[in-house]
Image: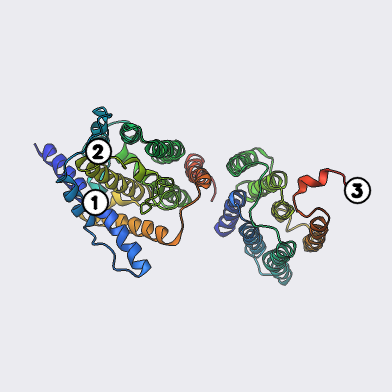
Amino acid sequence: MTAALEIVLRLALWLLLAPLLPGIINRVKAWVAGRRGPPVLQLYYDLARLWGKSVVLSNLVSPGFVAGPAVAWVALLAGALLLPLGSAGGVISFKGDVLLLVYLLAVARFCTAWAAMETGSSFEGMGAAREVSFAVLSEVALITAVLSLSALSGSVTLSGMLAPSVGAGAALLAAGLFAVLLAENCRVPFDDPNTHLELTMIHEVMALDHGGPPLAVILHGASMKLLLFAVLLCESVLPIGQLSPVAGAAALACAVLAVAACVGLVESLTARFAFRRVPLLLTTAFLLCLFALLLAWKGGPG
Amino acid sequence: MNAAVSLLIGLAMGLNLLSLASSRMPSLIRIVATQGVALGVIPILMEGQFSWLVALVSAVTVMLKGVVIPNLLHRAMRAVKIDREIEPFIGFVPSLLLGAAGTIAAVAGARALPLLPEHAGSLLVPGALASIFTGFILLIGRVKAISQVCGYLVLENGIYLFGLLLINSTPLLVESGILLDLTVAVFVIGIIMDRIQRAFDSLDTRRLTALRE
């Protein structure tokens, strides 16, 4: 009974808090640029407005056009539920759950790309191709980071492996995972969430033909993915699990806010990279995680 | 070996990879200069007691590698008016992966070498091997003469690191001699670049293989 209650509570927490993060990032960007900026709760208003609209369906599309975003959203929510929150630990935890997390992220990506290609629009095909080809590199980096955490802690459960030690390896891992976060969520050096030019967008272009509730689901899923990666980054670098539950939750919230502020600062201070430079940056992220893995493995000097 | 020296050598190894990934000439020159400064400080930290000679050589190294040589290169770049893009023979991603593989091989290989016990745990030998390897990749894999000069400088940084192993037994005169050679070499290369630019209207070293009247 209590377990079911805890699951419901966590689901509500993830669902309600996720749209806050893009609002905070936009606030930081507006603050750096000296503007007032949209309200922090802007995404909530957008989601409510989109939810009230009707769905326009092309007569070409299969049911996958609507099912894709829904499945992706459920997969992301399930992935979020696997992550332990601070010292409270995970509510569902079993041996190898980290693999399930990686695969759930891949399922979400597949479904978004599939739904994007349903209408047969060439722009959305381009967006899906970019998303998937960059994911090939960022997934390698993510899996290497997971391997290094696993080698460090000798555990293959998420709640066991997210108990990091401080050192050079943690710094490398933080840099690598931050780059993966930016790439996976299509933030600035990889993609510009503000651009509205089909030729240069990645994530935004895949949602061009969606409107109403499916678009709301896509946007909410994207914000949930951002929160998921931010929590993963914080917990794999900071020793949050050893604190008391209340202090751990507070530390986790502060760390996620700091990550959001960093994303906002990066977006304000750098320009989007040319597409041919993106693989280089993702390779760098992979190498950072690889060196963290080697440090964890060998426990070498430095 | 104290932690500060390990940190500096680790930084130099990171800068190695950064130099392979950088696509602009000024940033490449800046990276090489930073590496020279980081390595130039090491002798002061390594010596247990302070000695004027070591401090002097360290200061001269930092001055030359951090200020004089980068300035010479920047001036040469302005004088020959080339664009700032680095053209690679070996693409940035492959050379970065090669460099990382070389670094890992250097760390793994140094464990197998029969080193003195006081050097066995340090990063000096892996750092030196990795820098030399990075220098070779830059020398082979870049088209323009200035980036090849930077490769030569990274190579020299590796040799310098190797020389630090013998800091107690060889006179520092040798190191000063190397520094002097290096400066003269960069001078000469600057002049040669100017001549290449006048004769071929380009700094592309691929053109030097064809004979002209």
Query: Which of disc 1 and disc 2 is earlier in sequence?
Result: 1
Look at mark 1 in the image and give the residue it sits on: A19
What residue is at 27 percent from the left and 40 percent from the top?
Answer: A210
Q: Amino acid under label 1? A: Pro
Specify the color scheme.
Answer: rainbow
Look at mark 2 in the image and give the residue it sits on: A73
Query: Marks 2 and 3: in contact by CB < 8 Å?
Result: no
Q: CA distance from mark 1 to mark 3?
A: 70 Å
Q: Residues within 10 Å of mark 2 (few under 14, many from 20)?
A: many
**In front: B90, or A124?**
A124
**A279 is higher (above) or lower (below) than B173:** above
Q: Which structural element holds mark 2? A: helix
Query: Marks 1 and 2: in contact by CB < 8 Å?
Result: no
Look at mark 3 in the image and give the residue it sits on: B213
Query: Marks 3 and 1: in contact by CB < 8 Å?
Result: no
- Chain of the residue displaying label 2: A
Q: Amino acid under label 3? A: Glu
**In front: B211, or B158?**
B211
Quarter containing the N terminus of chain A: top left
Picture quadrant where residue B24 is located: bottom right
